[in-house]
Structures are given as structure tokens and as C-alpha cells.
Image (tube, grey):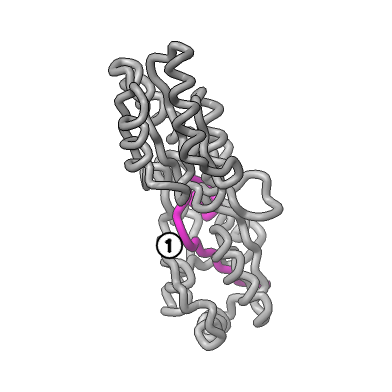
Amino acid sequence: MQRISVLTSGGDAPGMNAVIRAVVRTGIHYGMEVYAVYEGFKGLVEGKIKKMERSDVSQIINRGGTIIGSSRLRDFVKPEVQDIAVKNLRDLSIGGLVTIGGDGTYRGAMDLTSKGIPCIAIPGTIDNDVASTEYTIGFFTALDTAIDAIDKLRDTSFSHQRCTVVEVMGRNCGDLAIFAGIACGAEIVITKDTGFDHAAVLKKVRKANLMGKSHLVIVVAENITDVFKLAKDVEDNTTYEARASVLGYIQRGGTPSAFDR
């Protein structure tokens, strides 16, 4: 195999650039030509493919995001769309593809492999939800970001004797919420695994008040409940003032940690 390509797909994650750099420089080291596919599978179908040199990946190891862009292409599940991608690779005599992303990226890589384009899939997502992978690239950087934000929210919660309800990302995986909750000493952590019992949460908040806690932090994984409604319910049914905060896309950016490089 003389030519390979690399793409990033789905939600971006800190550390993707470090992987791109490694693929490009390792491929060149072993005598191969390496091509970047811009904007994920969408770019692969549209023919956005460019040959890379070592200099193209210089000074990117510490950069967040992905220099070659990413996207989601729902139509890539269609065989006729996959055939266009295969043709675009074969027209350039590219024999293999390295994909970086999450579940959807893995499925796309499997489809291309079944059509004769061998793929290597590298787990890159802050959600840490790729099967058979202990930790995905981007998870620990997102965790650091979440911890930093929650620590700051606790500071202001302490100052105003409040209950703060914080939503973190993770899609359908609770790892980000669990790890961040433990690291920040959250009084309550809510994920799909713990389950969400509205009455039980309010009971725990009241108990915290009886124990003399001046403030508390509740960490909630996304797609569980409306954190703004939960905060209002806490305020309406307990002695605490309550505020909600959704950390959102800030968790997907930033300089990757050592582990994610």
C-alpha cells in the first residue's frame, strides 16, 4: 500500500490533531503518501482530498479541534453514497483509510472496509462511549474542562448558599458526569446508570440541608432531564436557592491534555 488517507468525523474532540499528525508523519516515515480528507465522510463523497506533507502538520499537536474539519453525513448509510466515496479514493489510488471519531465514524469505516477499502478506526470523542475502548481521545481533556467549570461554579454556590445543577456532555454515556462528579465532590450525580428519580433527588437535597450543608452541586449527564426545570423544582421545594448551568460545547474545545496527545 503506497497511499493512505485520514479523516475526522462526527463531533470534534481535543487530541484529534495529534492523531492526524501521527498518521501523516508515520505514513511518510514508512514511504507512503498520505492524503487528508477534509470535512469527514461528507468531504470524502465530495472529493475534498489533499496530499499532506510533514510541514502541513507542524505545530498542531497542542491545538484543539481538527485542522481538516469534521461533519456528519447521515446519507453515508446509503450504499450508493458509499460507492461514491470508494470511487473517489480509488481514483487517487488510495488503498486505505484511517478514521478518527465515535460510533458513527466506526460504522462508516466498517461499511468502507466491506467494500474493499481497508480502514483503521481510532476512537476520538469526548463521550467515551466507544465499545472495547477504555478511554477515547478527547475524554480526559473534556473532563479537565468540566472539572474546572464545576469548581468555579462551586465557588459561587458557596458564596450565595445555593444549589447548582450542572449539565455535562456525554450523549448516552455517563462517564463524563461520573468522573467529574467524583473529582469535584458533587453531592449528587445523575446519569442513565444511576437513574433519575425526581422525588429522591429532592429528598437528598433536603437531607443535605438538614446536615448543615450551606450549598451543594448536582452533576447531570445530558439527555436525562431539563436541568433548568430541576433547579426550579429544587428552589420551589427546598430551602435552597438554585441555579442551572449547561456547560455545552466548551467541553469539546481547548488544548488537549497529555493523555489525549
Q: Which residue is mark 1?
A: 70
- Residue at image location 42% in from the left, 17% down from the top: 209
- Residue at image location 51% in from the left, 68% down from the top: 35
Asked whether, in this view, residue 130 is left or right of residue 17, the answer is: right
The amino acid type, in three-letter code, at marker 1 is: Ser
In percent of width and height, residue 105 lies at 55, 65
- Front-lying residue, 196 or 28: 196
- Residue at image location 45% in from the left, 26% down from the top: 205
Kindly give the residue lying farthest to the right in the view shown: 132
Residue 261 visible here: no
- Front-lying residue, 155 or 224: 224
Residue 126 visible here: yes
- Front-lying residue, 49 or 170: 170
In percent of width and height, residue 26 lies at 62, 55
- Residue 179, quarter of the rendered image: top right
SS category of the residue bearing label 1: loop
Quarter of the picture containing the C terminus is top right
Residue 126 painted magenta? no
Residue 16 painted magenta? yes
Kindly give the residue lying farthest to the top in the view shown: 212
Asked whether, in this view, residue 64 is left or right of residue 78, the answer is: left
Badge 1, how many Cα within 10 Å: few under 14, some, many 20+? many
Give the residues in magenta: 1-20
